[in-house]
Amino acid sequence: MNQTTANYDEPWKEALSEYFEAFLHFFFPEVHQLISYQLSVISYQLRVISYQ
């Protein structure tokens, strides 16, 4: 018996990555202003590590 499972996680991940900035801008404009969207996650992590 071959049972397939539903993929509930992937649509949420895609929605968050696609619309996260717009979501913050609409619902939390103060927080949206504090975030630099120019930096990628990796460059931010490298910057944090280099300060330690």
Image (cartoon, rainbow, N blue to C red):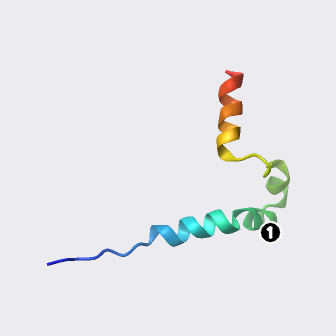
Report the residue that reaches farthest toward the top.
Answer: 52
The answer to which of 26 and 7 lies nearer the viewer is 7
Q: Position of residue 50 (x, y in %)?
A: 69, 24
Q: Quadrant of residue 28?
A: bottom right
In the rendered view, does 37 fall on the left or right side of 46? Answer: right
Q: Position of residue 44 (x, y in %)?
A: 70, 39
Q: Position of residue 26 (x, y in %)?
A: 80, 68
Report the residue that reaches farthest toward the left.
Answer: 1
* Crowd tier of the residue under label 1, counting other residues whose Cα lies within 10 Å: few below 14, some 14–19, many 20 or above: few
Q: Secondary structure at mark 1?
A: helix
What is the quadrant of the N terminus in the image? Answer: bottom left
Q: Is residue 18 above or below residue 49?
A: below
Q: Position of residue 43 (x, y in %)?
A: 70, 39
In the rendered view, does 11 fall on the left or right side of 38? Answer: left
Name the residue rendered at 70%, 47% in the picture: 40
Q: Is residue 43 above or below residue 37?
A: above
The answer to which of 23 and 4 lies nearer the viewer is 4
Q: Quadrant of residue 30?
A: bottom right
Name the residue rendered at 44%, 72% in the picture: 8
What is the quadrant of the C terminus in the image? Answer: top right
Look at label 1 and name its amino acid.
Phe
Q: Is residue 4 above or below residue 33?
A: below
In the rendered view, does 19 fall on the left or right side of 30? Answer: left
Q: How many marks?
A: 1
Name the residue rendered at 81%, 64% in the picture: 25
Name the residue rendered at 46%, 67% in the picture: 9
Query: What residue sits right under mark 1 in the picture?
Result: 26
Q: Is residue 9 above or below residue 30?
A: below
